[in-house]
Amino acid sequence: MKKIRILSIDGGGIRGILPGIVLTRIEQKLQEKSGDPNTRLADMFDFMAGTSTGGILSLAYLTPNEDNRPKLKASEAVDIYLDRGDEIFDVSFWQKVRSGAGLADEKYDASELEEALDDTFGDLMLSDLIKPCVISSYDIRNGKPHFFKQHKSVKNEIYNFKVKDVARATSAAPTYFETARIKNDIGTPYPLIDGGVFVNNPALVAYSEARKMSNPNSENGELATAKDMMIVSIGTGSVSKKYEYKKAKDWGAIGWIKPVIEIMMSGNSQTVDYHLGHIYSSLEDGHNKDYHRLEPKVVTADSEMDNASVENLTKLKEDALSYVSKTEVEEELDLIAQKLIDYGTA
């Protein structure tokens, strides 16, 4: 039985290293099991979804080379963070003073981030990506979610944007980077911020979008349902931080800024996982096992989204490698890789 194979990656700033390493391991297993060292994630997933750092990774996996094959290996995609994270999240003395450490203005100058995105994606358009995807952001002018959809951009230039602009918009985290102002293919401007403010875990968005796709096992044009999908959802090691009542009860707007962002992101990730777990638990005949939620743990590293010191980058990588080396995780990654192969060739 064929299935729509979906990859969803949470937001989480520099912690994108964690899903990046997990997906590098999955790609390696796919190559081993298929016997083809050129196998890439884009070959084995039919649809991808990402928010913020997860959006950047998804776009990287779907970027084509001159032969319309995936340009980057999974290991090369995560190198965007390992090689340039310390530059992207570097704050000068004057920026720190001017922004009041992120309270009066954005904490970081976006120029390093934009340079990294330009080096990675150039002038590639959303419509040029190898597979369909949905990348989240939020339109502050119109007060509503904005989803970049590759499959819609192919048919209508209104939905077509430069990939580097999509990546900039989905990662424009409030207080960290200034709001992105980007234009579509016909020049319409959009002021957008990080999709993590409302959908840090985009797996349910991916599920909803895939429901509009054709059922791969139907000859009558029926639409897909949960039993026709396999979802691999990967978190960024987010932790539910605890706050003491005695301290929180007297917080004002400034005191609540950082906790609110953390609560929104972590709370959404948990809620989406809960609902998808229930959707799949109601299925029968083995279909209930086709939702996989992988949540790497931050053990030795600092969990702050913007701690990109060389030391913390190393610790994040080590935490990710420790996670994928666990026996139970290794077994699940093996299972995922085999399913991805089987569901694509059944």
Image: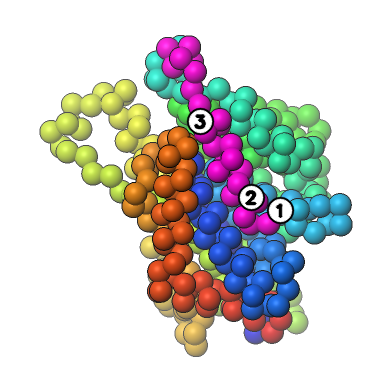
Look at the numbered disc 3 and give the secondary structure of its residue: loop
Give the spatial CA distance, label 3 vs label 2: 18 Å
- Tell me: residue 126, above or below residue 164: below
Magenta span contains residue 74: yes
Residue 205: % across, % down: 55, 56
Number of other residues with Cα within 10 Å of mark 2, as a class: few under 14, some 14 to 19, many 20 or more = many
What separation in Å lies between label 3 and label 1 (alpha carbons)?
A: 23 Å
Q: Quadrant of residue 270?
A: bottom left
Q: Which residue position is annotated with label 1? A: 72
Q: Residue, x 56% and y 31% (percent of image)?
A: 88
Image quadrant in which the C terminus is located: bottom right
Decide which of tag 3 and tag 2 comes sooner along the chain. Answer: 2
- Above or below residue 228? Residue 84 is above
Q: Amino acid at mark 2?
A: Ala
Image height check: is 29 above or below 241?
below
Magenta stretch bounds: 72-97
Q: Nearer the viewer, residue 341 or 141?
A: 341
